[in-house]
Amino acid sequence: MYYVYPSGWTGKLLAAMVEYVDGVCPKLVDDAVFGSGLLDYKEEILKTHSIVLLAWDKKSGWNDSTMQQLVMKLQKFGIPYEENAMEQYALKVVEKLKANVLSKGIRRCVGIELGGMAEDKHIGLLDDLLVEIFGKNVLILYFCGFIESYKRILRKIKNNNIPALAVCLSPYDLAMVDFVDVLCKVSWTLKNPSVKTIEIGHSMSDFSKMDLDQYEEYFDDLCIASSDFYPKTKPQMITCLKSGYLAFDRTCAELVGLGSGGGGILFDAYDEKEFYGMLPLIKEVLKEYKVRFRARFFTQGSDWKQSKRVIEMLLQNPNFSVDANWKMSLESYRDSFVLVCGATTMQYTFPLLTLCPSLVLSDSLGSLSENLGVVCAKDISPSAFLKIVQEIEANGLIWREKILHYRKTKCYNFGNASAYLAEFIFNFLRRKYGTK
C-alpha cells in the first residue's frame, strides 16, 4: 500500500502521479481530517512495512517549513518515508509518457500546461483549434499542475475523442520534458533547452517595463495582449508575440447574447485587507445600487475567516450578492456597469469584455488607460466615491465608445488570439516537418 503525506494540492498531484505510474491509488494522509491523520495510519504503515511518500515539491520551495515539521513528526514515530518522492515520480511519469508517445508514431507533438487557475481559461481555445487544423496528425499532451485540471481534461479527451494524453506534473518539472515539438506554458518556470517554449501565462500583464531577457531560460516566445503592454526595450533572446489574450476567446464566446452594462456594481477584492478598505464604499453604494462582491476565498483560504462574518451580515441586504467561483461567473460581467478593484489585471479584463469601465482604488496612477476607467485614492470618502459611480453610470454610452475604440486600436487579435497562436504553431511545425 502507498501513503502520500500530506494531502494538500501537492499531495493530490503526487497521488495521481503514483496512480499513473504504478496503477495503484495511494491513501492520502491528512492530519486535518478525522480518521485520516498520521497517527490513525501509524500502526497500519509500520505493520505492512510501507513507506510514506512525502508530497514535498522541493524545487518550488512553497512548503519547505511545513514539510520539515512533518519530517520531524515521521522520525519521531519511526515511520519510514521518501522525501524526494515528487521528483522521483516526476521522472517516472515523464519516462512512461515518452514511451507512450513514441509508440504512437505521431511526429507533431504539442504540450500544453494546465495550471488550474479559473478553469484553465488562459489557454483559450488553443487546443481545440490545433485539433481542427491538424486532425489526427497532432498529439496534444496536457501537463496538469492541479488535480481538478487533470480530471476536467480527462473528461474532455474522452467525450470529444481528441488525439491527446494527460498527466499530472508539477510546473517545476516541465523542464524534464524533451519529447514535444512545442510546449505552451502558463507558469514562469525553467524550460527544456531542446523544446520550443511559448509562455501564454496571463498575457493581460503589463510587460512594458520588464527586462524580459532575464527570463531566457524560462521561455522562447511570450504572448502579449496589447500594444500598451509591449516591452519598451526589445528583448534580444525572447520573441514577443502580438497574439492577444487567449482567455478572451473563450469568455467572448460565452458572453454572446448575455448583453452587458447591467445596473449593478462589481467589487473585486484581492485579499481581506483590500476588502476592508472597500467596505465603507460598499455600504455607501448599497443605499442606491445592487452590489456583487467577487470573493477570492480560493486564493486566501482561512485568511478570510474574519471577513466572512461581515459578508454574511451584508448578505442580509437583498441588493448584495457574492460570486465566490474560481472562475468569475458570466452574470457578474453582465449585471455590472462598473468594476471596483485594486491591484488586479481584472482592471483591464472587465472593461475589454463588457465595454464598461473599471474604478481602481490606488495610491498611484498606475498603468490603467484613461480610456478603460478611473483611478481614485484608496482613502476616498464614501460620498465622493458615490459621486464618481453616479457619473460613470450617467456616461455609460461615452465609456462604451471609449473602451471600444481602445479595444480596436490597442488589443491584439481580440477574440481571435487562440487562432493567431494556433497558426504560429502550425507554421513552426510545417517548417520543421513539411506539409503532411
Image (cartoon, rainbow, N blue to C red):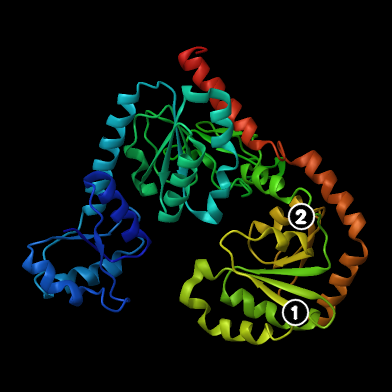
Within 10 Å of disc 2 (Cα), the crowding (few <14, some 14-19, many 20+) is many
Q: Is residue 170 above or below residue 41?
A: above
Residue found 64% across the figure and 35% down from its top: 243
Q: Are marks 1 and 2 in contact (CB under 8 Å)?
A: no
Within 10 Å of disc 1 (Cα), the crowding (few <14, some 14-19, many 20+) is many
Where is the N terminus found, in terms of image quarters?
A: bottom left
Is residue 429 rendered to the left or right of residue 277? left
Q: Position of residue 391 (x, y in %)?
A: 90, 68
Is residue 263 rendered to the left or right of residue 169? right
Label 1 vs 2, first from the N-terminus: 1
Is residue 265 rendered to the left or right of residue 294? right
Whole-number angstrom distance, CA of label 1 to CA of label 2: 21 Å
Observer-nearest residue: 419 or 412?
Answer: 419
Residue found 80% across the figure and 40% down from its top: 408
Q: Quadrant of residue 356?
A: bottom right
Q: Which residue is mark 2?
A: 351
Look at label 1 and name its amino acid: Leu
Q: Position of residue 395 (x, y in %)?
A: 92, 61
Look at label 2 and name its amino acid: Pro
Q: Quadrant of residue 297?
A: bottom right
Q: Is residue 422 above or below residue 408?
A: above
Q: Which mark is residue 281?
A: 1
Observer-nearest residue: 190 or 28?
Answer: 28
Q: Which mark is residue 408?
A: none
